[in-house]
Amino acid sequence: MLARSFRGHGTFFYLARESLAKFAGDGDKLASAVKAADMQHAWVRLHDHEMKMEPEQPTTQLVDALVKANIAVAGWGFVRGENPLAEAKAAAGFMKKFNLQHYVADIEQDEHDSRWTKAGIATFLMELRKALPAGAQVLVSSYPYIRVKHPELMKAAAPHADGFAPQIYWVNHPQPYMLVKSALPPNPSRQYDAVKDLHDPLAYADLCLDWWRATVGSGKPLIMTGQAYWESGFARSDAEAKLDLFLAGYSRWQSIAGINWWHFGHQKNLAGNGAMTQSMLASIGKAKLAGKPFQVV
């Protein structure tokens, strides 16, 4: 069965110190807010794309507070594939440092000078499994519309991963080119309309999930990461409205093993970007997502 750290409803945490700062450094208050949002799991960043460990004290404080509140915690980090063997050993070391068992590998080929090959991704995942405790599970998190973002790498990962976490950040997707007949996935789970589905987060979620199933196979659990952030060019009000639209309309919970949000953490002011707002948090909590009929795997 898929680990509790991956099933049901949860969230990413990005920077531990800044996330705690939203709650005046009080880990118990932060964990209470996570529980109030009806979240059962959390993915805490342990290292950056250069394999540098996150600051120990705030990361430990965050992990301990979440575990104390009975929130299942997995570690995560961005890996570039520059040296898959060394990166696997380093990631396992960080997991041991923070006393965690299950890991999410953020693999995005076009970011941070990533250098993945099909052989490299298999090596990384196999070596990581050897270095982690017995029974540890590993997810791979990557792009949403995988059709055009190195699907061959995710196919190579599939035999070695326990599941995948597509980063389905809808912004203003789907775009027109995604909805033409020649671009639609094989054996789609629904009909797509090139007019009605344009820029609709519900349609984008389905479209991305259909392409992921076509890429990695129907037997691999998918945990959708939804958009709970705003950024320059996609206003806060628009992000909040699209999230509300998704929460009000999405019904295909049995097609996914869980949903996770990017991200619960700190408010970012640089470059006009922001993480989960209070409005988003309230909407997510009101939706009672932990009780949705997720796929049991």
Image (cartoon, helix red, strand yellow):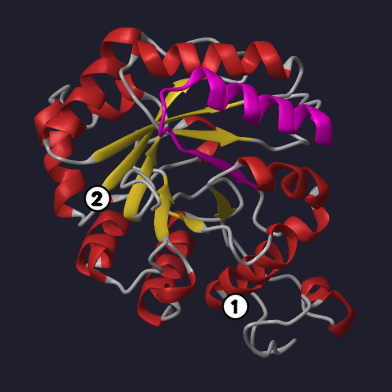
User: Quick one: 132 or 82, which is closer to the camera?
Assistant: 132
Please give the residue where the numbered disc 2 appears in the rendered image. Answer: 40
Element type at mark 1: helix
- The residue located at (12%, 37%) in the rendering is 69
Q: Residue furthest right?
A: 182
Please give the residue where the numbered disc 1 appears in the rendered image. Answer: 203
Residue 244 on image: x %, y %: 37, 71
Q: Quadrant of residue 100?
A: top left
Cα distance, mark 2 to mark 1? 26 Å
User: Quick one: 136 or 93, which is closer to the camera?
Assistant: 136
Q: Report the side of 217 relative to 150 (left or right).
A: left
Whether 191 is among the magenta residues is no
- The residue located at (37%, 34%) in the rendering is 74
Q: Is residue 214 above or below residue 132?
A: below
Amino acid type shown at disc 1: Ala
Residue 279 on image: x %, y %: 28, 58
Element type at mark 2: loop
Q: Quadrant of residue 125?
A: top right
- The residue located at (85%, 84%) in the rendering is 181
Amino acid type shown at disc 2: Gln
**Magenta segment range?**
116-142
